[in-house]
Amino acid sequence: MLMLRTLKKVYKSLNMITHFTNCISFPSSLPPHQSQAPQRFDLSRVSFTVRRFQIQSSVRSDKSQIPTRFFVSPVSRGTRNQAQVALFDYLHSTRSFTFTDAEHISKNSPRFLSFLLSKIDDNERDVSRALSKYLRYNPINEFEPFFESLGMCPSEFEQFLPQRLMFLSDDGVMFENFHALCNYGVPRGKIGRVYKEAREVFRYESGVLVAKLRAYEDLGLRKGTVIKLVSSCPLLLVGGVDGEFASVVDKLKRLPVGCDWLGRDLSDSKTYSWGRILETMEFLERMGCKEEKLSSLLRTYPALVIEGSGKKFCVLFGGLFKLGLHVEEIYSLFIDNPEMLSDKCVKNIRKTVDFLIGIRMETHFIRKILLSHTERIGSCSLQAPRTVCVSLNVSQEELCQMLKNEPLRLFSFVTTTKKRKSKLLSEDARKHAEKTAFLMRLGYLENSDEMVKALKQFRGRGDQLQERFDCLVKAGLNHNTVAEIIRHAPIVLNLSKDVIEKKIHSLTELLGYPIESLVSFPAYLCYDMQRIHQRFSMYMWLRERDAARPMLSPSTILTCGDARFVKYFVNVHPEGPAVWESINQSST
């Protein structure tokens, strides 16, 4: 009976392979007898042909780069969770991935999960079991969910898929360098950018990548700053230490602001030119902006140098210089009115200059207005010249002459949309104003859709929100990092100060994790204390007995379901169930 089953499976496999080989278009130059079904089957060739067929068939007729197989109907949360469990078990149990790798890939490859779900019956109740059966007989190309879990979409990683490889273990060099970045602290979801922009980093020999990361620490940078730099500027890891970047660091070392200022204000969604940043800083020094003043400018208005690598500053300076302002006058404007370097003020100044040029005012009059009313110009957003002319029923020449005689009349042409300050005396309006002011300090734009959404999410007065925000800053996080955490998990500020302090104490004192762990997992603060206490206690018990890895991510411990936690954190030790039960009883 067993022999009969085995023969049936072999026969079925041979039929499948024959079907694949029949689909292969052999070159016309081959002899006729070679176009028939061969007696020996080259599986690698069949695998390559199938991979090529998938890539070609996934491109839409409009030549879009997004594979159509990822365009599937949305699935319910329960179905998605079951699919994640099936993929996790396949990667962890069948393919021997580490727990952390398997969990991250299964939870961060939603498009690939949708593709897998399209391979089973829609009416299937036990999705996890059906997918496990499918994966048992249909090995997947592991590079697809892996690249997606790194933050890349199919249109981006399709070009990086190896032609003749299906398993990540086949590319050990790439996987080793990936783990080097993970172990150093680079968030897995941001490694995709490193792969796209500096792919050669993943071909380094063992130990080379770690040495390059430490070389930047040797410049005097903290580890957290290096992580932020690598995420936003992957090309720093190519070749030796970047000379222009090293010059920027040396210059910052001589300033009170310090070189760690870079880590506070860099964005991993933008690119930077270190040469241009260095030129901007040197230009400010030549203008007379010495150590203390330059440090003050960089702290208060980092966008002056960082945003566009100093391009905005250069454009503003060049525009003012063309209007006839002398270098000393421009420098005086910056020093006396440093707020004019903010994005909003720069936009208003350019809009005012465009307004005056639009009505054909002479440059010496424009220069006079700018020098006399810089502060008011930076705080006002003017209407378009045509709108003003229509409302006053005058021509552009008449409007120009009017402003020459009465320059202050310019500020009566401010846009009047969204005026909601008539009820500031009421209590609700006062609270609204406090919360708005707090959000603007975090970088939200006034009256933007993002601010409207944030105002609905945050509960409490402005001073209460500020107190909770300061609590995170006092714990050891810098201002910009906390602002980024709040953007990703706004509910954090709805917690009381005492609750925030207790959760931070559990993370840093009991487990010994750095406070920077909140950057990659801000949702930690949103879990209730009972869950945190129970799971951390169990994990610490396992860690003391070398039954668990020493520094598992807090997200791995807290986000998995109860059944999964019991399977991987309780049942892994003979005494685990009894300890887990006692922990639950003591916390109830």
Image (spheres, rainbow, N blue to C red):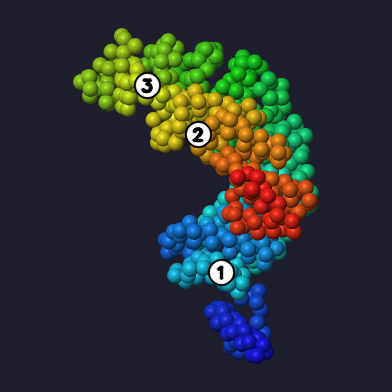
Q: Residue at x 65, y 45 (%)?
A: 586
Location of residue 353 in the rendering, given as x and y in whole percent from the top left corner: 40, 21
Q: Residue at x 74, y 37 (%)?
A: 216
Furthest residue in direction left, as rendered: 393
Q: Are marks 1 and 2 in contact (CB under 8 Å)?
A: no
Q: Which residue is mark 2?
A: 494
**Residue 440, placed above or below residue 65:** above
Q: The C terminus appears in which quarter of the rendering?
A: top right
Q: Residue at x 22, y 24 (%)?
A: 390
Q: Which residue is mark 3?
A: 427
Location of residue 187 in the rendering, given as x and y in whole percent from the top left corner: 64, 45
> Element under label 1?
helix
Which is more N-terminal, label 2 or label 1? 1
Q: The N terminus appears in which quarter of the rendering?
A: bottom right
> Element under label 3?
helix
- What label sits on residue 129 in the rendered view? 1
